[in-house]
Amino acid sequence: MATRAMVLAAGLGTRLETCTRGLPKAMMPIAGKPVLAHNLELLARHGVREVVVNLHHRAGCIVEYCRDGSRFDLAITYSLEPVLLGTAGAVKRAAARFSSTFFVLYGDNLSTCDLSRLLAFHRRCGGVATLAIFEREDPTAGGIVALDGDGRVRRFVEKPDPSEVFSHLVSAGIFVLEPALIAEIGEGTRDFGRDVFPALLARGFPLFGYRMSEQLWWIDTPADYACVSRIFAATGASR
């Protein structure tokens, strides 16, 4: 069982500024509670007990809401970034917290991903990382992935130009990582999609993709936010 996770919640959410009203993107309310709360509840349902949350913009409102994590049956610690470190840099900074297999979630998306199945797939494959993968009509806003027949990642390109699109399979921003991967994140390396995953593939490290049959909702624009809010209001999708 993976009992630790990192939730990335330091983003500015500049494309959603008209919706966030100064809040961190992860604190935007969906169905009466912040996006971050939905993700913490998802982790707790799948046996995670300790979570590191990175912070930057309006950090205090996240700490005030989550506190020590006991309201979610979690123990939460915080990693404050005076200067944004990027997705990989954030995990690198928190390396001391992760001595065994752990999850990473981008805290500004919503999902019903079965983290227990994702972890079981990761264990069977035996790679240094497993990425939850989702099919997206417009893949240019995410990291696109090519998988072989065994689910091994053969190519990864972050936010490609339309002329570079070779797949509609996109990273869901949900990973299972082994601690050994952290050692491969160089000093100053910022991003998993642009830096870490392509470099690991070039060096022959085994990365795998778990093709999700569950739901995933990106919240990248005000229109996305309005759509997801309507869905959750109507269906209570994460409950």
Image (cartoon, rainbow, N blue to C red):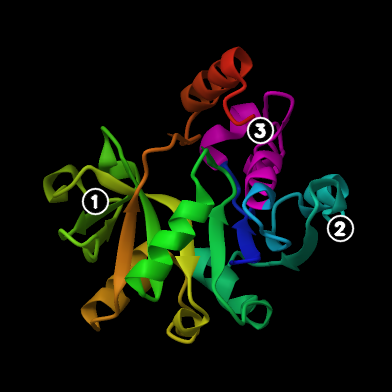
Q: Which residue is mark 3?
A: 20
Which quadrant holds the C terminus?
Answer: top right
Disc 1 is placed on an element classified as loop
Label 1 – label 3 distance at C-alpha? 27 Å
Callout 3–callout 2 Cβ contact below 8 Å: no
**Mark found first going from the N terminus, 3 or 2:** 3
Label 3 – label 2 distance at C-alpha? 24 Å
Q: Is residue 233 magenta?
A: no
**Can you tell which mark lies on residue 37?**
none
Disc 3 is placed on an element classified as helix
Q: Is residue 28 left or right of residue 183?
A: right
Judging depth in this view, the residue of 229 and 55 nearest the camera is 229
- Asked if one can make out residue 106 in the rendered structure from this viewpoint, the answer is yes
Judged by depth in the image, the label closer to the viewer, 3 or 2, is 2
Magenta residues span: 14-43
Task: State whether residue 91 is above or below residue 9.
Answer: below
Question: Mostly what secondary structure, the magenta segment?
Answer: helix
- Which residue is rendered at x = 24% and y = 60% of the image? 151
Circle 2 residues within 10 Å: few <14, some 14–19, many ≥20: some
- Which residue is rendered at x = 42% and y = 84% of the image? 184
Q: Quadrant of residue 229?
A: top right
Callout 1–callout 2 Cβ contact below 8 Å: no
Residue 193 image offset from top left, x and y in percent:
37, 62
Disc 2 is placed on an element classified as loop
Three-letter residue code for mark 1: Pro
Circle 1 residues within 10 Å: few <14, some 14–19, many ≥20: some
Q: Is residue 142 left or right of residue 110?
A: left
Label 1 – label 2 distance at C-alpha? 39 Å
Q: Which residue is mark 1?
A: 160
- Asked if one can make out residue 195 in the rendered structure from this viewpoint, the answer is no
